[in-house]
Image (cartoon, grey):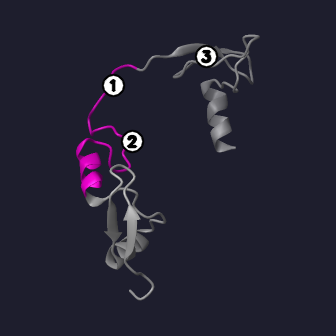
Amino acid sequence: MDQFQDQTLTCRDCGNSFVWTASEQKFYADKGFSNAPVRCPSCRAAKKAQGGGGFGGGMRAGASYGPRQMYDAVCSVCGKPCQVPFQPRLDESGNPVKPIYCNEHYRSQRTA
């Protein structure tokens, strides 16, 4: 544990100082985490309790938001009508700001 030394950090949420111990740093390194914590233990626990912790995208297991709203669009590659799960942003002339892909071209873009 020689390469790790206690560090004093400032919490992003409450602004209080907290100590990131050498043993915590070793734990982070062993897990492959490259960033230091940005919240003190109290704020981290509060954030986790409100459902903002972890890597789950914020969705609880088994939770459902219901059917997703889909929007009509035209594929930028083949010109076929399609539906996308976001409202396309259009420029002044009515063209999409970013390319829009039908299912077939979306899959080919992701594997490219």
Q: Are marks 2 and 3 in contact (CB under 8 Å)?
A: no
User: Of label 2 and label 3, which has the lower sequence position?
Assistant: 2
Residue 75 drawn at (x, y percent): 69, 20
- Dot 1: element: loop
Q: CA distance from mark 2 to mark 1?
A: 13 Å
The nearer-to-camera label among 2 and 3 is: 2
Vertical placement of residue 29 versus 55, above or below: below
Q: Are marks 2 and 1 in contact (CB under 8 Å)?
A: no
**What secondary structure prevails in the magenta region?**
loop
User: Of label 2 and label 1, which has the lower sequence position?
Assistant: 2
As shown in the figure, which amino acid type bears the numbered disc 1? Tyr
In this picture, which residue range is highlighted in magenta?
Answer: 42-67
Question: Which residue lies at the image location 50% right of the left edge and 16% below the top edge?
Answer: 70
Asked which quadrant contains residue 92, the reply is top right
Which residue matches tag 3?
A: 82
Q: Are marks 1 and 3 in contact (CB under 8 Å)?
A: no
User: Of label 1 and label 3, which has the lower sequence position?
Assistant: 1
Label of residue 7 in the image: none
The crowding category of the residue bearing disc 1, from other C-alpha atoms within 10 Å (few below 14, some 14 to 19, many at least 20), is few
Question: Which residue lies at the image location 70% right of the left edge and 26% below the top edge?
Answer: 99
Is 51 inside the magenta-drawn segment? yes
Residue 19 drawn at (x, y percent): 33, 70
Residue 72 drawn at (x, y percent): 58, 12
Q: CA distance from mark 2 to mark 3?
A: 27 Å
The crowding category of the residue bearing disc 3, from other C-alpha atoms within 10 Å (few below 14, some 14 to 19, many at least 20), is some
Asked which quadrant contains residue 68, the reply is top left
Q: Quadrant of the C terminus?
A: top right
Which residue matches tag 2?
A: 57
